[in-house]
Image (cartoon, rainbow, N blue to C red):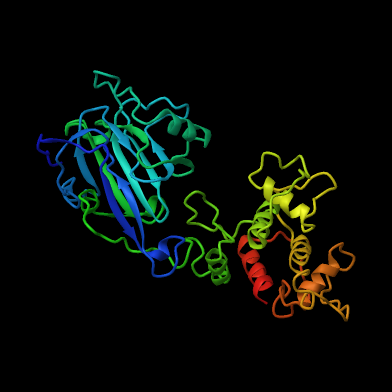
């Protein structure tokens, strides 16, 4: 590890500009999005050099970050808004592993920062028994079940103190410092790039890592529908606040479809609270708006069941309720055609047939498509295609 000179500078308020291509975020095509990155050491630190790629362990590996020398307990801050996903160096009860390497990872939506060698000493010692990560982050890690990698979802803001400089891990003989990494991608497989140009404010562009709005739907048969809904602001992803994932294979919930429909129709706030089981749900206002507009319905007479998977038959009725009034010619089945063999007697059979007549659904068993699978939960990817066909015809 290269020693840095002892010319100290104060960069607690330093801002670095990081430009990402438009496809890596929810932004209009060909319009770049720029993030302001806060310098990760919020206090006096030595001048740092670009030692990214230097040999380590006899060149069996290379250095994947930049070292910023600073005194122990100098605050380390989040370089940008993001989600802390990984915490290391602690026992499952939140006590420090004696002498353990304390570090953490923040996901920023297609790119990632890592903060290594955080302090593990009690003040004035080198005992390896201290804590160099903020209490809030460690508490979130414990609540998540103390996962070995990933599994945490603790939001942080740019400039928020996340820990303190130290010499944990293999930095005991190198002097206290922050090893700062910048990576493209997500999770343990994110690829390191040289952070030095960003720390010095040079103009560098990260390479995008996926197509369209979301990182987890490339190649999905419903991908174009998912991106179209994101273009129109109807869907916002499944991992707020970054919303870089769509979770296409997860079941659509009744609460989520309420939000879809309310955003699409721009429904006003309701004057009545229709159910008590959704009072603490983020979808409470969406559900009430849907009910007041005559579109929604409960899973029982007294409950909405916002966290329950939306069934395909329920989806048919909600879409007909939402769109038939403004497109009555399309949403009709004048010949009362019975399109499917597996929905006879279903309470939503009429809506299912109307949806087929409107070419919003095409059955669930191609190429025959004589079955609708009314009781099957609807995936988020399927919902995107249903919804887009309902909107556009």
Name the spot of residue 69 as percent of width and height, x first. Answer: 18, 36
Is 218 located above or below residue 117 in the figure?
Answer: below
Horizontally, is 108 left or right of 262 in the view? left
Q: In which quarter of the view is residue 257 placed? A: bottom right
Front residue of 183 and 88: 183
Q: In which quarter of the view is residue 316 placed? A: bottom right
Q: Is residue 389 visible?
A: yes
Q: Residue at x 86, y 63 (%)?
A: 346
Q: Residue at x 21, y 46 (%)?
A: 66
Q: In which quarter of the view is residue 43 placed? A: top left
Is 263 located above or below residue 76 in the figure?
Answer: below
Horizontally, is 380 left or right of 156 in the view? right
Give the residue furthest to the top.
Answer: 124
Horizontally, is 169 left or right of 225 in the view? left
Give the residue furthest to the right.
Answer: 345
Is 98 located above or below residue 344 in the figure?
Answer: above
Name the spot of residue 164 as percent of width and height, x first. Answer: 30, 31
Front residue of 147 and 40: 40
- Quadrant placement of the N terminus: top left
């Amino acid at each position: 590890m290269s020693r840095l000179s002892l010319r100290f500078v104060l960069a607690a308020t330093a801002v670095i500009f990081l430009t990402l291509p438009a496809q890596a975020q929810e932004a209009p095509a060909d319009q770049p999005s720029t993030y302001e990155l806060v310098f990760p050491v919020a206090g006096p630190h030595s001048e740092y050099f670009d030692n990214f790629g230097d040999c380590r362990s006899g060149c069996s590996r290379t250095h994947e970050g930049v070292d910023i020398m600073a005194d122990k307990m100098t605050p380390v801050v989040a370089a940008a808004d993001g989600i802390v996903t990984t915490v290391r160096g602690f026992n499952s009860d939140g006590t420090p592993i004696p002498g353990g390497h304390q570090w953490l990872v923040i996901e920023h939506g297609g790119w990632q920062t890592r903060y290594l060698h955080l302090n593990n000493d009690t003040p004035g010692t080198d005992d390896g028994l201290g804590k160099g990560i903020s209490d809030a982050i460690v508490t979130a890690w414990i609540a998540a079940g103390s996962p070995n990698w990933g599994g945490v979802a603790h939001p942080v803001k740019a400039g928020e103190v996340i820990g303190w400089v130290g010499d944990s891990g293999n930095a005991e003989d190198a002097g206290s410092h922050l090893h700062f990494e910048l990576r493209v991608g997500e999770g343990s497989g994110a690829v390191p790039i040289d952070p030095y140009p960003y720390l010095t404010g040079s103009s560098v562009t990260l390479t995008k890592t996926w197509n369209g709005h979301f990182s987890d739907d490339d190649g999905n048969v419903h991908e174009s529908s998912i991106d179209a809904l994101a273009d129109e602001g109807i869907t916002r992803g499944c991992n707020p606040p970054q919303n870089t994932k769509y979770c296409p294979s997860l079941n659509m919930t009744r609460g989520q479809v309420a939000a879809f429909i309310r955003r699409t129709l721009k429904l006003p706030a309701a004057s009545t609270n229709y159910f008590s089981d959704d009072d603490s749900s983020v979808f409470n206002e969406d559900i009430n708006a849907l009910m007041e507009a005559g579109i929604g319905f409960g899973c029982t007479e007294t409950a909405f069941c916002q966290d329950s998977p939306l069934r395909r038959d329920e989806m048919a009725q909600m879409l007909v309720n939402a769109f038939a009034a403004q497109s009555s010619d399309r949403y009709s089945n004048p010949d009362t055609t019975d399109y499917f063999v597996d929905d006879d007697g279903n309470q939503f059979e009429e809506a299912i047939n109307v949806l087929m007549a409107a070419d919003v659904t095409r059955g669930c068993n191609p190429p025959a498509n004589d079955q609708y699978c009314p009781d099957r939960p609807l995936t988020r990817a399927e919902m995107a295609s249903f919804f887009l066909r309902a909107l556009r015809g």
